[in-house]
Image: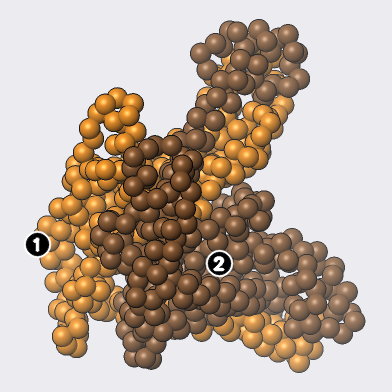
Amino acid sequence: MTDATHKSAFDAARGAGDTKKPSLIGRTLIYCGLVVVSFIMLYPLLWMVSSSLKPENEIFSTTSLIPQNFTLEAYRRGWNGLSVSFGWMFFNSLVISVLVVIGNLISCSMAAYAFTRLKFKGRGFWFALMLGTMMMPQHAVLIPQYLMFLKFGWVNTILPLVVPKFFAIDAFFIFLMVQFFRGIPRDLDEAAVMDGAGPLRIFLKIILPLSMPVLATAAVFSFIWTWDDFFAPLIYLNDIEKYTAQLGLRTFVDATAQSDWGALLAMSTLTVLPIFVLFVLFQRLLIEGIATTGMKR
Amino acid sequence: MSVTVTSAAKAPLSERLNNQLAGYGFLLPWLIGFFVLTLGPAVSSLYFSLTDFSLMGSPNWVGTENYFRIATDDPRFWTAMNVTFTFVLLSVPLKLMFALAVAVALDKGLRGLNWFRAIFYLPSLIGGSVAIAVLWRQIFAGDGVLNQVLAALFGYEGPSWISNPSTALYTLVMLAVWQFGSSMIIFLAGLRQIPQDMYEAASIDGASRQRQFFKITLPLLTPVIFFNGVILTIEAFKAFTAAFVISDGSGGPIDSTLFYTLYLYQEAFTNFRFGYASALAWVLVVIIAIFTALSFISAKYWVHYDD
């Protein structure tokens, strides 16, 4: 932004129509800045992937991002680096994440449907409470929840990670769906009521089929957040056979004591890979989901 | 009661009953979840916080002793507060500034917007994972990438940034700032809302670009800045994974990365002091509530609303 006078001269020449677009010099500077920032942003990730494809002695001997002696050896070492194969832990993560997606989609869409389409006493009250739970940090309920699941004999199983999601515990997704359901025209339900359809049929035949975008957004975020979750598995899963990929990776840090960076980076790359694939496939959905609801992460 | 009479006149009793049944039927999973997994545990943990409950025995009522000890006789609590507040007060403004600057740069109608947006967003999608914490450990280690680059460029032999107590926390701040992407996307959406003709009118009046930024863009964006600020602050108070992985769960070196949540975790699940940890949890709830309330109060003075 150093050459304001220069720019305004350009603007005057172009006329006042396209006011947002800077001059050629301004654009070039912004491009250069963006490219530099992008490179700094991506460098750690590129380094991770490229180091995982190098032989161990090459990781630190050169800062080049292109492996001179391409090898998958680090992946082989990492995959079998713990007493339980990483494949098994990936499977555990996948099972938990898929079940959480199913639980969230069913329970949150039901709650959102009740909040937006059904008339019953106390609806406003419950809705306000639901919004209140979004603000509440999990830490306040953590210990009693843990003790309850301990009593149920659920600790060291996937149940504490999965079952709560079937009870719409992620209020955020209810909120997301409420926003979307409100936009579906009411004429559609009213026409269906005329035809004698009950609430269940309207939910299944009208609301859900029209809500595919928001269901997909909720599903993708749900999957990614569960896949990435570290805290809940850390508390509830004790045996290495039950570990998720995230827990496995963290155990691997201790096990290798930083002596085998190649293997560690190879497994890091693998745990990020599913998220990266989802990101590439659903980029637009994710970005729109954030832009419209202001959700985080 | 007149309400019931009129609605009774409108719809037959069976239909109204059906509505109630359907409403509560669809809400049932959430209601169960709310009572069993949120309200019940919240009440219990409030009770536990007033007891000496630990793995050793059943809870005995001790009144406000836990809270008293937290405030007066727990140096690690104050360390954790110090670390957490430093983290929040550094990472949130930096993240906001980065997100805003990049969003403004991207909002110039340049080509390749989608590419840049995707690149900047990616870190905030994966940044919370263990893999990225592991990566950060490698980057800032004594023989890590950063020191390699420093040595290659300037011949400077850097220390181990993560095992040095005076720098470890700042590597975590950098990790947080690296994830500015989702705030940036919200800013971009906010920038799109600003009517184009305001800029046109301003430039006809001869307002420079800087002036337009400070007189139009920034004031109209204050609601979004506020929203992002509140969410980022709550998130920063709850940060856990990176500090846990980078410090091996200890909050070290010498408690320099002892985030509040990490201390809470240690008390609850390493030392099994459930009563004390519950009190710590409620202190965190109150701190976050105070911060949020203060933000809303301050909003009256700086957030610009149309009406």
Give the percent coordinates (x, y) of residue B144: 30, 43
Q: Residue at x 70, y 77 (%)?
A: A118
Instruction: Please give left or right for residue B148 compared with residue B113 in the image.
Output: left
Q: Nearer the viewer, residue B139 or B108?
A: B139
Give the percent coordinates (x, y) of residue B230: 44, 49
Q: Which mark is residue B73?
A: 1
Q: Marks 2 and 1, Cα distance to the nearest angstrom?
A: 43 Å
Q: Residue at x 77, y 88 (%)?
A: B15
Please state which amino acid type lies under the numbered disc 1.
Answer: Asp
Q: Is residue B148 visible?
A: yes
Snapshot quadrant of residue A125: bottom right
Q: Which mark is residue B287?
A: none
Say which residue label 2 marks: A223
Q: Colour of chain A?
A: brown
Q: Nearer the viewer, mark 2 or mark 1?
A: 2
Q: Secondary structure at mark 2?
A: helix
Q: Which chain is orange?
A: B
Give the percent coordinates (x, y) of residue B9: 79, 84
